[in-house]
């Protein structure tokens, strides 16, 4: 079977898988960004309880493997009465895992906004929430965009693990095709190329574009 | 613990100062930076603080702006305690709400300007009036443009700080502080980070404020000539205390204390 024939036969399934990977990627990114913001701010909170929860979350999700977290969320949580569909378990695990790393980026970026900015905002009598929202976060956002670019690429690669709980993503389809055809080079080679294209020609240019837009908005273009 | 019953709950009478430091102490761990400071500033008065590096000048301004907490004593603004609030007939440390209420009377300009880099000059000025005072965008814009005009920056109102020189940034920072309509303005070495040729554009703005507005001002500067020109009173700080104070002509022409004389002659040599 030529590679061309392989693509004609299995192309649709590979495209289906790619679409699922794309959706897992988008949902997981949304989860990661949301929890990173919450946990990053939580770690800076003056409230001990909030801080403890944030630190515990960050420690657990950074300190253990994504695969184990995925299995926990999909196989163990049901024992405690929380059953998630595999699709949701997939992007939630990936998002929560990456979000824990993202939280450190959020915290670090907030802390590297110069102290004088806090002081100027306080001198204008802004409330703590206004200082964060209007003055600190917009500047922190620009600082953390480049490292987030790397993290989002990691997230894309991480979504391949959801195939292990039978979410029908690109990796899952490739494995299925390989199992029925034994065409390993074609199956996994195609997956390799598609992941590379997604990362290199979609995610990276998008992040670069976002960095440029934000820099211009913040008057540094 | 200090006995707070010795302090009045508020200042009343004919001569209530705009700012009063009563017995104010500030320390960082073992290091006592200000030692039982007493200082009154009358409404409309321009007071300049001079003194060697590390003598506590910046700390005085930062305490008044509530950027630093104090370890003893009370600061009052316009008759009301700032660092404390009355509760059950005595003064207790101020909570966030009380600080916010009294802090509204005070504005500050910093050595390094601290403009918000993600906002234009105009947006920097409008931020406080819109977010904190609740003015409409329209009203805040009018007020801000008026003040940017006052400081000579109206032409650059749509520029971000990164496109402005230091002198221009500092003038915007002054307009930003004034847009909050403070009663007291604090200037902490606002010309120290500037190139010599642009210092004049900032000092001229401050001169204008002194002559045309009835603001109470507390300024730290190393520019003795400027201080002498525009101040009502000079306070010479040394080691966290006021070593000597008086009208500029007296203090500069005829200093009473050795340390003042030494400081002034050292400064003169440096120029
Ligand atoms: N955050 C701080 N922690 C410890 N020491 C400080 C801090 N801020 C200021 N100081 C010390 O307080 C003293 C007075 O500082 P400052 O008010 O800035 O002096 P000045 O403005 O007169 O140069 C200095 O000895 C300085 O080192
Ligand atoms: Mg200083």
Image (cartoon, coloured by chain):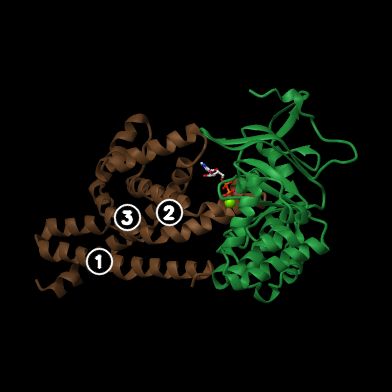
Residue A18 found in image quarter = bottom left
- Name the subunit of mark 3: A
The chain drawn in brown is: A
Front position in the image: B116 or A11: B116
Instruction: Place residue A116 in its image quadrant.
Output: bottom right
**In the image, are marks 2 and 1 on the same chain?**
yes
User: Which of marks 3 and 1 precedes in the sequence?
Assistant: 3
Is B233 on the left-hand or right-hand side of A64? right
Residue placed most toward the observer, A108 or B137? A108
Looking at this view, is B234 or B137 the one in front? B234
Q: Name the residue under label 3.
A: A155
x, y percentage for residue A101?
35, 48
Look at mark 1 in the image and give the residue it sits on. Answer: A196
Q: Residue A30 carries which label?
A: 2
Name the chain under label 2.
A
Q: Is mark 2 on a helix, strand or loop?
A: helix
Residues packed near mark 2 inside 10 Å, few (<14), some (14 to 19) or many (20 plus): some
Mark 2 or mark 3: name the one nearer the start of the chain.
2
How far from the left and from the top, in percent, is residue B218?
71, 52
């Amino acid at each position: 079977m030529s590679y061309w024939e392989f693509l004609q036969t299995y192309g649709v399934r590979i495209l289906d898988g790619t679409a699922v990977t794309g959706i897992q990627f988008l949902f997981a990114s949304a989860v990661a960004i949301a929890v990173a913001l919450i946990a990053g701010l939580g770690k800076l909170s003056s409230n001990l309880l909030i801080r403890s929860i944030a630190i515990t979350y960050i420690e657990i999700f950074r300190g253990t493997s994504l695969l184990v977290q995925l299995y926990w969320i999909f196989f163990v949580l049901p024992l405690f009465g929380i059953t998630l569909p595999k699709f949701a378990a997939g992007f939630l695990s990936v998002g929560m895992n990456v979000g824990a790393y993202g939280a450190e980026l959020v915290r670090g970026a907030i802390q590297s906004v110069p102290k004088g900015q806090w002081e100027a905002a306080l001198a204008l009598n802004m409330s703590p929430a206004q200082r964060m929202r209007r003055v600190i976060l917009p500047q922190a956002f620009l600082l953390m965009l480049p490292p987030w670019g790397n993290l989002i690429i990691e997230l894309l690669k991480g979504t391949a693990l959801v195939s292990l709980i039978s979410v029908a993503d690109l990796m899952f389809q490739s494995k299925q095709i390989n199992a029925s055809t034994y065409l390993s080079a074609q199956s996994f080679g195609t997956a390799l190329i598609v992941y590379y294209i997604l990362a290199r020609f979609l995610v990276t240019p998008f992040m670069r574009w976002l960095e440029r837009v934000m820099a211009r908005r913040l008057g540094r273009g | 613990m200090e006995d707070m019953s010795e302090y009045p709950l508020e200042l009343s009478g004919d001569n209530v100062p705009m700012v009063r430091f009563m017995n104010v102490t500030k320390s960082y761990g073992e290091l006592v930076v200000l030692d039982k400071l007493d200082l009154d500033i009358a409404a409309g008065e321009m007071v300049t603080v001079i003194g060697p590096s590390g003598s506590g000048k910046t700390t005085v301004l930062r305490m008044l702006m509530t950027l630093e907490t104090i370890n003893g004593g009370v600061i009052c603004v316009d008759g009301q305690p700032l660092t404390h609030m009355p509760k059950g007939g005595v003064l207790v440390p101020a909570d966030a709400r009380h600080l916010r209420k009294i802090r509204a009377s005070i504005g500050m300009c910093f050595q390094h300007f601290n403009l918000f880099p993600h906002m234009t000059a105009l947006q920097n000025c409008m931020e406080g009036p819109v977010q904190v005072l609740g003015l409409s965008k329209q009203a805040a814009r009018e007020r801000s443009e008026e003040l940017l005009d006052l400081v000579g920056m109206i032409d650059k109102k749509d520029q971000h700080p990164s496109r402005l020189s230091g002198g221009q940034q500092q003038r915007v920072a002054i307009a930003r502080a004034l847009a909050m309509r403070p009663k007291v303005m604090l200037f902490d070495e606002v010309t120290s980070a500037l190139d010599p040729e642009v210092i004049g554009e900032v000092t001229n703005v401050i001169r204008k404020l002194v002559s045309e507005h009835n603001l109470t001002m507390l300024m730290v500067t190393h520019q003795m000539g400027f201080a002498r020109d525009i101040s009502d009173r000079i306070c010479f700080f040394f080691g966290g205390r006021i070593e000597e104070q008086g009208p500029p002509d007296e203090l500069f022409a005829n200093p009473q204390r050795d340390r003042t004389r030494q400081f002034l002659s050292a400064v003169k040599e440096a120029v």
